Image: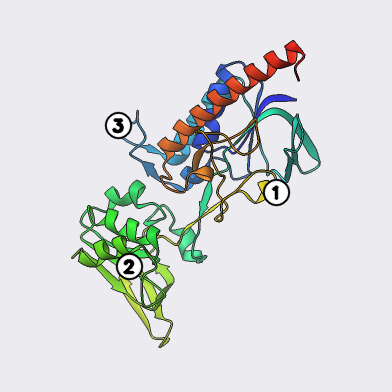
Amino acid sequence: MFDVVIVGSGPAGLTAAIYTGRARLETLVIGSATWGGQLMLTSEVENFPGFPDGILGPELMSKMRMQAERFGAKLIFEDVTSVDFSSRPFKINVGDKSFMAKAVIIATGASAKWLGLPSEARLRGRGVSACATCDAPFFHDKKTVVVGGGDTAADEALVLTKYAREVTIVHRRDQLRASKILQERAFANKKINIVWNSVVEEIWGKDRVEGVKLKNIQTSEESTFSTDAVFVAIGHKPNTDVFRGQIDLDEKGYVIVHDGTKTSVEGVFVAGDVGDPRYKQAVTSAGSGCKAAIDAQKYLQEHLILEKDGSV
């Protein structure tokens, strides 16, 4: 039995653990085998406060982990297989093991959708990215490619124009799916070019991105295109499959957030990208982890008082 079980070990989950641990709450963090969230795939982080010279993503997560452990949080790195929020205490299952919790914080994040190319995985963090806000400053006066055609792709392209010399959107259709206002901004920006009806078949480069191989899906014609970076902007998938049927999710699978950090189940809170389809930043995730921890602590205090009064 734990006071708080935090599902997820990225910036949101570990920040929550720092706060709940420091509040002397018995805390368990269940992070997946690939712990640390998306920052584990990021080379250098320059926009997290407190690190004026930047810090490597894995190093930042390691420091957060050590800080959470310093305040007594217990961490295990396995995948949650099922949960039961229908009765209290809540039950979280990890394979054949079960953990009971008086309160739960969901901080499982959202995973960027990738193209699935071996070269993409090999060059991730070496010119392949899924976050222009995070990595665009590394490509000042460089050539960049954005893959996608929705709001995410248009947003990424517009962010990149503030730094890159040239931005090329590669889209598999003959028109963008982005909102009208974003399309108008993209078409009006002289730095943005669009390659229609095409897909990226390969990203080439030895130690860093040097170019892409494109294929026109209508003519099957192949071509090569030199670039210094590839930003994959085909959307994100919130990691909420295990919570379906237990809490309310929106049509895209994100946790529906009430009053800051609350979910549809009293005593279950949410932090980070899993409930935030908009910002997707480490610092906003950390901030929401702090808020969820404080709300969970307040919930436990009120709940324990009621128990002592015999009202529950």
The reply, left or right, for residue 120 in relation to residue 242 is: left
Q: Identify the residue shown where x is 68% and y is 48%.
A: 242
Residue 5, quarter of picture: top right
Q: Is mark 1 on a helix, strand or loop?
A: loop
Query: What is the distance, in whole Å, between disc 2 and disc 1 at their CAs?
Result: 38 Å
Q: Position of residue 63 (x, y in %)?
A: 48, 29
The residue carrying mark 2 is: 169
| Residue 283's disc number | none
Q: Depth-wise, is mark 3 or mark 1 nearer the camera? A: 1
Q: Depth-wise, is mark 2 or mark 3 nearer the camera? A: 2
Look at the picture and state if 234 lies above or below 174.
Answer: above
The residue carrying mark 1 is: 245
Q: Position of residue 118 (x, y in %)?
A: 51, 65
Residue 228 visible to the viewer: no
Q: Identify the residue shown where x is 39% and y is 54%.
A: 126
Q: What element carries label 3?
A: loop
Q: Which of 237 and 253 is in front in this view?
A: 253
The reply, left or right, for residue 276 in relation to residue 193 is: right
The image quadrant where one finds the C terminus is top right
Look at the picture and state if 176 lies above or below 57.
Answer: below
Look at the picture and state if 130 lies above or below 62.
Answer: below
Q: Which amino acid does label 3 sit on?
A: Pro
Residue 123 visible to the viewer: yes
Look at the picture and state if 228 lies above or below 212.
Answer: above
